[in-house]
Image (cartoon, grey):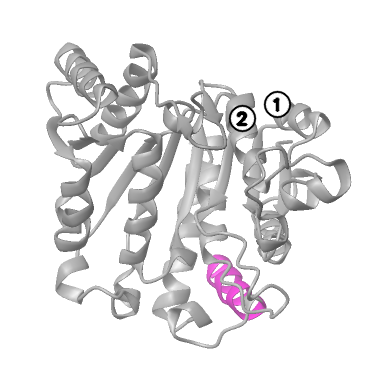
Amino acid sequence: MPTIVTLPGDGIGPEIMAPAIELLRTISEDFSFEEHLFGGAAIDVHGSALSEDTLAACKQADAVLLAAVGGPRWDTTDPGKPRPEQGLLGLRKGLGLFANLRPVRPLPALYDASPLKRERIEGTDLLVVRELTGGIYFGEKTRTDRSASDLCEYSVDEVDRIARVAFDAARTRRKRVASVDKANVLETSRQWREVVHIVHRAKYNDIELTDVLVDNAAMALIARPADFDVIVTENLFGDILSDEAAMITGSIGMLPSASLGAAGDPGLFEPVHGSAPDIAGTRSANPLAMFLTVAMMLRHGLGWETEATAVESAVDRACNGGLRTRDLGGNATTAEATRAVLDNLDG
């Protein structure tokens, strides 16, 4: 019986977690769910975005399913006060989740929902592989009254292991990897490029490797997104580029993600969108990214490929049938979107 730790979090998080659990119970009655406070909700109760008990439970689970964290209620520039996002960083570090996978595949039925022209996005099917536990987010930080600094640091081993994840993923796709860096300026990027090429020469000569500077990658994602297959990059660049790529689908409410560590360790699965406090309680939150996140959990966390494909197909069929939530230009509620997907799953 797989044990899933659920972290509803903040804002619309609980509103999209409930449909996700309903979807999983429809797929199988064998799941065991263990809910914990996380993010701002945990700060209110425990004074910390990630309690020791929650981290311990996540380490013992088969997979961790997270909805969303954050909100203006907990926004602060005071480095001494807790922020919801610190829970995410702590969970990634605590579980050793070094590889973040974000697929971007706009559905043909939703091409017209994208701010980009149909002819630009047609055929887009890319995967962003983001290094998750190194770089500027985790480097030493200093702050005085007159200055502040954030250290960006990477080891050879950290780059080596994320490069292998990207190349392995490319072998199951179209065998092309774009390694994104800023090697014309940053020493960490020069090392990144060297290590990625060493890994490529050693084991992955069947994969086409291209180096792309991050500013050029940002432009190409808008101008020619279908040219990309797998993008591998460091933590900060991956955070920015994956959110940019999200708009290709028409809404950030359509994108799932998976954060993975060593084989056999529990992964963390979460939709890319945030907590959307402006629509919390309006029953209009789009649950589709959460459903697609469930599919990634089934595939990468539990090895349930058949069930993962069934969920993805159900979302496709629901959208082909006209399902549109508010962010996609329609008026379907969270409950109506959930029903449409479940009906197609059964069918």
Residue 116 drawn above or below residue 79: below
User: Is residue 270 positioned above or below 152 on the image?
Assistant: below
Per the image, label 1 sits on a secondary structure element best described as helix
Compared with residue 219, is residue 55 higher up or lower down, i.e. above or below? Answer: above
| Residue, far front | 146
Q: Position of residue 49 (x, y in %)?
A: 74, 42
Label 2 close to label 1 by CB (< 8 Å): yes
Residue underneath mark 1: 59
User: Amino acid under label 1?
Assistant: Lys
Q: Nearer the viewer, residue 275 or 97?
A: 275
Amino acid residing under circle 2? Pro
The answer to whether residue 169 of the structure is visible from this angle is yes
The magenta region covers: 335-347
Task: Answer with the quarter of the image where residue 247 lies.
Answer: bottom left
Q: Residue lying at the far right in this picture: please name it.
A: 45
Name the mark on residue 266: 2
| Residue 141, numbered circle | none
Q: Residue at x 29, y 80 (%)?
A: 112
